[in-house]
Amino acid sequence: MRVKEMLQTKLDDRGFTLIELMVVIVILGILAGLIIPRIMGRPEEARRMKARVQIESIETALKLYKLDNGNYPTTEQGLQALVEPPAVGQLAKAWRKGGYLEKGKVPKDPWGNEYVYLSPGVHGDCDLSSYGPDGEPGGEGKDEDVNSWELE
């Protein structure tokens, strides 16, 4: 019986052959080559989506500001008028205590830049833009701006 156990132990201790390891490595390489390029483009797409959502949220706050005060904050007052009563220009008549934005601060765009706000705007009552990852107006491809007047 001991010989049988020794033979069974020897058979159980066998490892992978070099060919088996090479096949697994090739398969993992092929999978990585197919999956990694798809994953790498997603963070930028997620940042663009976050910018759109933030712009829509800020637009909602601007509309509430207008309902309370009769007009949008001026370009000079900026988006800061949504978190504290404006001290310059036309003062807010009925500024809402606590402000119009959650967390009591104006968010930065997903690339860490300030949103660009114009009132009166070129494309509407007020325009809101993120200049994207390059922080410069205009741009194409990954550097394309996210603009309030282009949102669906």
Image: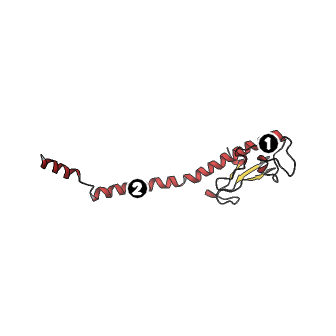
> Label 1: how many residues lie within 10 Å, few (<14), some (14-19) or many (20+)?
many
**Between residues 152 and 80, which one lies in front from this camera angle?**
80
Q: Nearer the viewer, mark 1 or mark 2?
A: 1
Dot 2: few (<14), some (14–19), or many (≥20) neighbours within 10 Å? few
Name which residue type carries label 2: Ile
Q: Is residue 80 left or right of residue 142?
A: right
Name the kind of residue labelled 1 in the image: Tyr
Label 2: which residue?
30
Identify the residue at image location x=64%, y=58%: 133
Residue 90 screen position, x and y as percent: 87, 48
Percent x, y for residue 31?
Answer: 41, 53
> Is label 1 in a helix, a strand or a loop?
helix
Extreme-front residue of the structure: 2
What element does badge 2 sit on?
Answer: helix
Residue bearing the label numbered 1 = 65
Splitting the image into 4 quarters, where does residue 116 fall? bottom right
- Please name the colour scheme applied to the rendered image: secondary structure
In the rendered image, residue 52, in percent from the top left (x then y), is placed at: 66, 47
Give the CA distance from mark 1 to mark 2.
54 Å
Residue at image coords 36%, 57%? 26
Residue at point 69%, 58% (across, down): 138
* Picture disc at residue 129: none
